[in-house]
Amino acid sequence: MTLLRPLLLAASLSSLLPLAHAEEIGKISTTFRLLSPNDKVVVEAFDDPSVAGVACYVSRAQTGGYSGAVGLAKDPSRFSVACRQIGTISFAKALPKQEEVFKESASFIFKHVRVVRMVDAKRNTLVYLTYSDKLVDGSPDNAVTAVPVSGQNIPQK
């Protein structure tokens, strides 16, 4: 119970942070299932909530079948991320060295796909890392992408 309290507190506090919301761009079927939904790869996009002019695209596996149809399936930890400059980059606020910018459920309750933005001040670049977590153990599967910022320095906290 001693270990569970900090985990529950962290989970409840992280739900208060302003995170980006994804928009589904498209999906393709990867496994045919005769009487239930197919397994799919889904592509979603979101704009960085603190950096105007940067959009990220996340692809992830989505389990089909009957459990997937009712939202009880555990999606695999296979995904990628690509972030790009889509306009003039501007900053809503000074950025911390590392900040979670996206979180989406990948199972009924305890697994999430997350995207964290890191600031590489030496190279004046924004680095985005995607990974998954679970309440007890996460996955080492991850993907990374970077967006260089030219013409201005990244404001940091």
Image: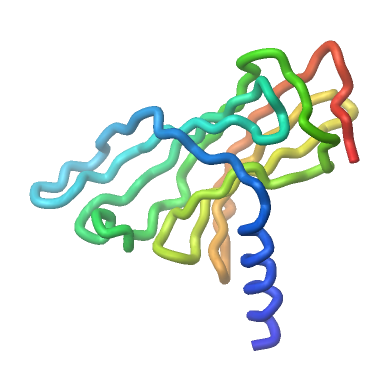
Looking at the image, residue 135 lies above or below residue 96: below
Q: In the visual, does 37 lie left or right of 138?
A: left
- Which of the 4 image quarters holds residue 124? top right
The C terminus lies in quadrant: top right
Relative to the observer, which residue lies in front, 140 or 151?
Answer: 151
Q: In the visual, does 81 lie left or right of 106?
A: right
Residue 5 position in % (x across, y down): 67, 80
Looking at the image, residue 135 lies above or below residue 144: below
Relative to the observer, which residue lies in front, 103 or 137?
Answer: 103
Identity of the residue drawn at 65% across and 47% down: 18
Relative to the observer, which residue lies in front, 95 or 127?
Answer: 95
Residue 142 position in % (x across, y down): 58, 44
Q: In the visual, does 125 lie left or right of 36?
A: right
The N terminus lies in quadrant: bottom right
Residue 96 position in % (x across, y down): 83, 42
Identity of the residue drawn at 54% across and 63% down: 134
State how many labels appear. 0
Identity of the residue drawn at 69% across and 27% down: 146
Identity of the residue drawn at 88% across and 30% down: 155
